[in-house]
Image (cartoon, rainbow, N blue to C red):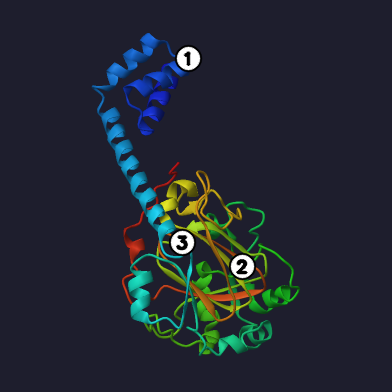
Amino acid sequence: MAQSDKRQLIAEGLAAGDDDAALHARLVGAGVSAASAKYEIERLSKDPMAAMLRRQAARMAKQDWLFANQQRLAFEAEGGFALDTLDKPDPDLFYRHHYAANRPAKLTGIVDHWSALTRWSLDHFGRVAGDAAVEAQVERERDPDYELDKDDHRRLVRFGELIDWLRKDEASNDVYLTAYNSGTNAAALGLLWDDMAPIDLLEARGDRDGFFWLGPRGTLTPWHHDLTNNLLVQVIGRKRVRMAPPWAFARMRNSRHCFSDWGNEALPAGEGDADTPPILETIIGPGEAIFLPVGWWHQVEALDLSASMSFTSFRRSNSHVDDYRSWGDIA
């Protein structure tokens, strides 16, 4: 066996937390002679990189223990691992028991005062902004990494043309106006903000707060976690939202940035198992919302022609992105 192969086996063993006996067995099991394995392991006692790997493996084992306890507590809670539904929530209680506690919730009754609930339609969009140039994510279906590569999918289109295409009511994940396009669209679609009003749970920030989403049934936002707390409000149609907790990190297969290798997989609701994470699932319809805490994994699927707004303007600090950096390839 080449020396590089042996070093690879040793590195894998150290990262997995192998002690000397387990590391010896790993090497011998891969075809390294017992004498050579003993020699390699004795060298490790003088290798500072090996010592650091062992300390890191111990830290990861401790972290796994803490996550396992968080799961145990979540499952043993009254009602079990479940998503709360809050109707016209008191802001103080929401911030204490959900925002500060990093717990998602389905919210109802928070935008009953929006005229958008009765006014928004494809016809309304065409009347107020049909001639506007808007930015959309396009040609997503040809690219399995369309979310990671979203800069490559930005295109300017006439809003009226997009509306005509949406009238076909065909399932598609190919064209979607998303929050990522809001730099252009908040100005182009400014009149739509007249159909909204402040939400009691949020900080009032004046005109054009929030991010507009519009797409056909079949649009999918793949599994990922956000870098801020988010409030997603549904105005037209329905969306299915699946969520997994931060403490299921190891089972979320996070190898790049904030995205999960599960992609668009429809992970089943429930407590999960050794390989799959525990999943909460709900459907939000017009006038309903979901609070997505920072770090919670989620996947969003439009079940109908869908228009939504999302907000990050909470009354408490939401600047978690400020000290986030991309760690590149994680796994």
Secondary structure under tag 2 reads loop
Residue at mark 2: 176
Residue at mark 1: 31
| Residue at x 50% of width, y 44% of height | 274
| Residue at x 31% of width, y 43% of height | 62
Is residue 149 at least partly visible in the picture?
A: yes
| Residue at x 46% of width, y 61% of height | 80
Q: How much space separates mark 1 and mark 3, taking CA atoms?
A: 48 Å
Viewer-closest of 44 and 272: 272
Rendered location of residue 102, percent (x, y): 38, 65
Q: Residues within 10 Å of mark 3 (few under 14, many from 20)?
A: few
Camera-side mark, 2 or 3: 3
Quadrant containing the C terminus is top left
- First of labels 1, 3 by sequence position: 1
Secondary structure under tag 1 reads loop
Rendered location of residue 156, percent (x, y): 60, 70
- First of labels 2, 1 by sequence position: 1
| Residue at x 40% of width, y 63% of height | 294
Q: Amino acid at mark 3?
A: Gly
Secondary structure under tag 3 reads loop
Q: Amino acid at mark 1?
A: Gly
Residue at mark 3: 80
